[in-house]
Image: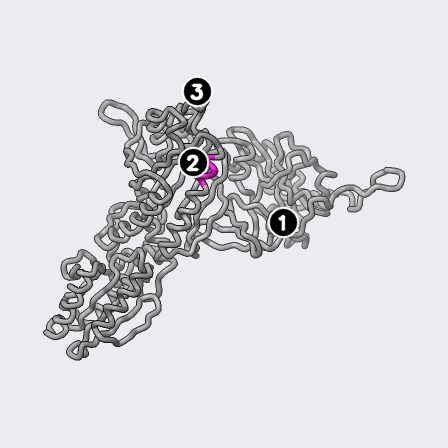
C-alpha cells in the first residue's frame, strides 16, 4: 500500500476526553474515529489489525474442532423472556419494537439464539459433542462508555458454544477451549493470566475463567498467589485474612467443665457523632482490624445484614450469590434506621431480627469494637460467638493484598488486568429452559450440557497497545501489526532513493510481505514521527546511501538500527517473518 493513498489521518495531540493511552494512540495514529459515545469507525489500519486478530482466533477455533456460523444480531425478546434473562440483564440490553409492535433486542450475546438453533436441529446423542463459534458485532448500552474500545456500546466479539451429552463431555470441551485461548493470546503477543471468576449475568452451574491481559489501566483486579498457581478476579477471590484465626474465640474450660472468658466483658461506650472506622480509630486508638462493621442491604426487597471486619470491604457479588437473589443494593438511611433503631454509623449485629451474614474473618477477631444499634453508642470488648450469634458464617468480603492464599497460605498479590476472554460451564441452564434436548443411548430425552466461550476481539486492539507502546507511539507485535514493513524514503524527489524504494516495495510484495510505502512528499521528521506513531514492526529508511545500495533497518520494539545492503535487508526481513 502506498501511504499517499491510505486513509490514515494522524493527530499530533489526542482529544482531551481520551483517558487511556490505547485510546489516545488509536486516535492519533489514525486507526479509529468516534462516531458516538462508545461507538467507533475503524479506518483501514484499524480494520487490518482486526482482521489479523480474527485470523488467529479462527485458526485456533478451527484447530480446536469448532465450526463457524453467523447468528442474527436482532433477537426476538421472547427468547430472552423464556430464558429468564430479559429482566435480569437490565438496561444494557438494547430493546426495540418493529413496525408490527413485536419486541426485539440487539444481541449482547447469543446463548438464547444458539441454544434454540441447536435444539431444533440436533436430537440424538450421535450428533454430539458439537462446538460452534461466530465473530460478530455485539451491542450493550453501557451506562458509561470509557477508555475507547475497552468499554464500548458496539464491539466485535468471538463467541463459541459447546453442546455435550454429559458433564464429563463438557469438562473436555471446556479445557479444550482453555488451551485454545492460551494459544490465541500467546500468538497475539499478549502478557495474560487465566483467573477464576464469577459468571455474572451469563450464569451457569460450573466453573468459569477470565483471561486477563495485564495492564495498569485494567478495570479488573487480579488476585494471585506469590507461590502457587492460584489466581482469581477480585469478585471471586478467596483468602485467609491476616490477623485472624478461625478458632480463636472458643471459651476456655475449667477442670470441672465450667467455661471461663479469656477477654473482658462487653461494655457500652458513648461515642457522640463518631460513625466511621476512621473516626473510631482516631478517637479510641483501636486498629481497624479490631473493629466490626455491619452494613444493611436490601436483597430482593428484604433487609439483610452483612458483617465484616473494619479493614475489609463487602463483596456484593459473593453476598448476592450466597442469597441467590436477583437484586442487591445498600439500604438507604431510612431503611437502616428502621431495621437497627439507629442512624447509619451505629449498626451492629447484636439483637437484629433480620438475616445476618457474618464474614469468616470476623469470627476470629478478639476483643472487638462494634455498633450498639443506638445513636452515639458502640460496644467494646466484643467477642463474636459470645456477644452475638454466628449462624451464617461465610466468605462475604473482598480479599486484600497481604492476605494468605486459600490453597498454600502464601501471600496474595494484586495486579490490574483487562478482561479479553471468558469461558463458562453453563450446564443445563439454557438447554432446560429452551428445550435443547437429545435422545440418549437408551432413547431417553436428556438436556444438552453446554459451555460458552467469549473473546472481545475489538478490545484486544486496546489491550495490545496498553502493553506495547512507548512515548513515541504504538509498538505492534508482528503477528497483529497492520503492516509488517514500513518503507520510508527520505525524499521522493531523489531519483536514486525512489528507485531503491520502488525496488524494495515490489520485491517485498512479490514475496508476500505486507508493506507500506511512505511515498508522501513530506519532511523526513514528519514521516518518522508518523512511522513511530503507527508502530509497524520493521522500518527501512532509504536515504543518501541509496546510491551505494545501503539502507537503514530499524526494529520498532528494540529501537535497534542497522545499516545494511538492500539484499541483506530483504534476507533479514524474511528471517524475522519466518518466526511468526
Quadrant of image for the C terminus: bottom left
Picture coordinates of residue 394, whole percent (x, y): 62, 39
Quadrant of image for the N terminus: bottom left
Asked if one can make out residue 139 in the rendered structure from this viewpoint, the answer is no
Picture coordinates of residue 333, whole percent (x, y): 54, 37
Residue named by callout 1: 241
**Residue range highlighted in magenta:** 169-174
Secondary element at tag 3: loop
Tell which of 497 and 373 is nearer to you: 497
Residue 170 included in the magenta stretch of the image: yes
Q: In front of the other: label 2 or label 1?
A: 2
- The residues tagged by marks 1 and 3 sit, at their Cα atoms, a distance apart of 52 Å
Residue 323 included in the magenta stretch of the image: no
Please tell me the numbered disc located at residue 443. Answer: 3
Magenta residues, dominant SS class? helix
- The residues tagged by marks 2 and 1 sit, at their Cα atoms, a distance apart of 34 Å
Amino acid at each position: 500500500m502506498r501511504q499517499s493513498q491510505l486513509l490514515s489521518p494522524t493527530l499530533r495531540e489526542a482529544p482531551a476526553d481520551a483517558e487511556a493511552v490505547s485510546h489516545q494512540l488509536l486516535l492519533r495514529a489514525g486507526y479509529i474515529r468516534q462516531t458516538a459515545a462508545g461507538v467507533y469507525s475503524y479506518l483501514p489500519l484499524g480494520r487490518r489489525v482486526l482482521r489479523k486478530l480474527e485470523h488467529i482466533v479462527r485458526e485456533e477455533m478451527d484447530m480446536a474442532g469448532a465450526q463457524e456460523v453467523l447468528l442474527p444480531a436482532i433477537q426476538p425478546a421472547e427468547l430472552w423472556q423464556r430464558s429468564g434473562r430479559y429482566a435480569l440483564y437490565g438496561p444494557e440490553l438494547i430493546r426495540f419494537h418493529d413496525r408490527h409492535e413485536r419486541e426485539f433486542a440487539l444481541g449482547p450475546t447469543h446463548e438464547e439464539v444458539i441454544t434454540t438453533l441447536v435444539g431444533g436441529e440436533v436430537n440424538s446423542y450421535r450428533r454430539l459433542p458439537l462446538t460452534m463459534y461466530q465473530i460478530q458485532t455485539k451491542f450493550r448500552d453501557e451506562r458509561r462508555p470509557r477508555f475507547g474500545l475497552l468499554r464500548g456500546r458496539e464491539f466485535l466479539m468471538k463467541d463459541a458454544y459447546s453442546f455435550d451429552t454429559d458433564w464429563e463431555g463438557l469438562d473436555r470441551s471446556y479445557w479444550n477451549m482453555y488451551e485454545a485461548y492460551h494459544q490465541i493470546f500467546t500468538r497475539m503477543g499478549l502478557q495474560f493470566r487465566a483467573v477464576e471468576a464469577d459468571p455474572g449475568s451469563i450464569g451457569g452451574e460450573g466453573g468459569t475463567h477470565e483471561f486477563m491481559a495485564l495492564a495498569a489501566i485494567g478495570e479488573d483486579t487480579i488476585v494471585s498467589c506469590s507461590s502457587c498457581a492460584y489466581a482469581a478476579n477480585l469478585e471471586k477471590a478467596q483468602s485467609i485474612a491476616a490477623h485472624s484465626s478461625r478458632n480463636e474465640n472458643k471459651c476456655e474450660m475449667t477442670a470441672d467443665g465450667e467455661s471461663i472468658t479469656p477477654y473482658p466483658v462487653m461494655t457500652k461506650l458513648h461515642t457522640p457523632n463518631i460513625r466511621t472506622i476512621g473516626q473510631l480509630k482516631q478517637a479510641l486508638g483501636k486498629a481497624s482490624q479490631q473493629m466490626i462493621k455491619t452494613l444493611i442491604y436490601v436483597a430482593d426487597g428484604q433487609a439483610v445484614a452483612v458483617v465484616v471486619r473494619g479493614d475489609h470491604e463487602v463483596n456484593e457479588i459473593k453476598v448476592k450469590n450466597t442469597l441467590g437473589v436477583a437484586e442487591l443494593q445498600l439500604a438507604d438511611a431510612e431503611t437502616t434506621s428502621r431495621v437497627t433503631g439507629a442512624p447509619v454509623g451505629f449498626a451492629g449485629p447484636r439483637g437484629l431480627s433480620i438475616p445476618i451474614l457474618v464474614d469468616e474473618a470476623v469470627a476470629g477477631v478478639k476483643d472487638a469494637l462494634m455498633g450498639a444499634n443506638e445513636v452515639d453508642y458502640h460496644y467494646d470488648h466484643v467477642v463474636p460467638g459470645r456477644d452475638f450469634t454466628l449462624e451464617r458464617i461465610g466468605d462475604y468480603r473482598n480479599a486484600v493484598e497481604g492476605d494468605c492464599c486459600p490453597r498454600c497460605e502464601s501471600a496474595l498479590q494484586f495486579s490490574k488486568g483487562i478482561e479479553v476472554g471468558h469461558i463458562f460451564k453453563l450446564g443445563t441452564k439454557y438447554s432446560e429452559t429452551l428445550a435443547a434436548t437429545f435422545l440418549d443411548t437408551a432413547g431417553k430425552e436428556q438436556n444438552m450440557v453446554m459451555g460458552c466461550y467469549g473473546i472481545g476481539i475489538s478490545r484486544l486492539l486496546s489491550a495490545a497497545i496498553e502493553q506495547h507502546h512507548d512515548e513515541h507511539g504504538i509498538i505492534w507485535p508482528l503477528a497483529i501489526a497492520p503492516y509488517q514493513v514500513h518503507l520510508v524514503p527520505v525524499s521522493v524527489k531523489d531519483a536514486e532513493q525512489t528507485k531503491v524504494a520502488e525496488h524494495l516495495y515490489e520485491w517485498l510484495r512479490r514475496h508476500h510481505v505486507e508493506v507500506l510505502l511512505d511515498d508522501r512528499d513530506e519532511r523526513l521528521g514528519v514521516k518518522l514521527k508518523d512511522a513511530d506513531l503507527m508502530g509497524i514492526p520493521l522500518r527501512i529508511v532509504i536515504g543518501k546511501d541509496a546510491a551505494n545500495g545501503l539502507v537503514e533497518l530499524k526494529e520498532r520494539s528494540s529501537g535497534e538500527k542497522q545499516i545494511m545492503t538492500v539484499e541483506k535487508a530483504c534476507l533479514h526481513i524474511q528471517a524475522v517473518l519466518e518466526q511468526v
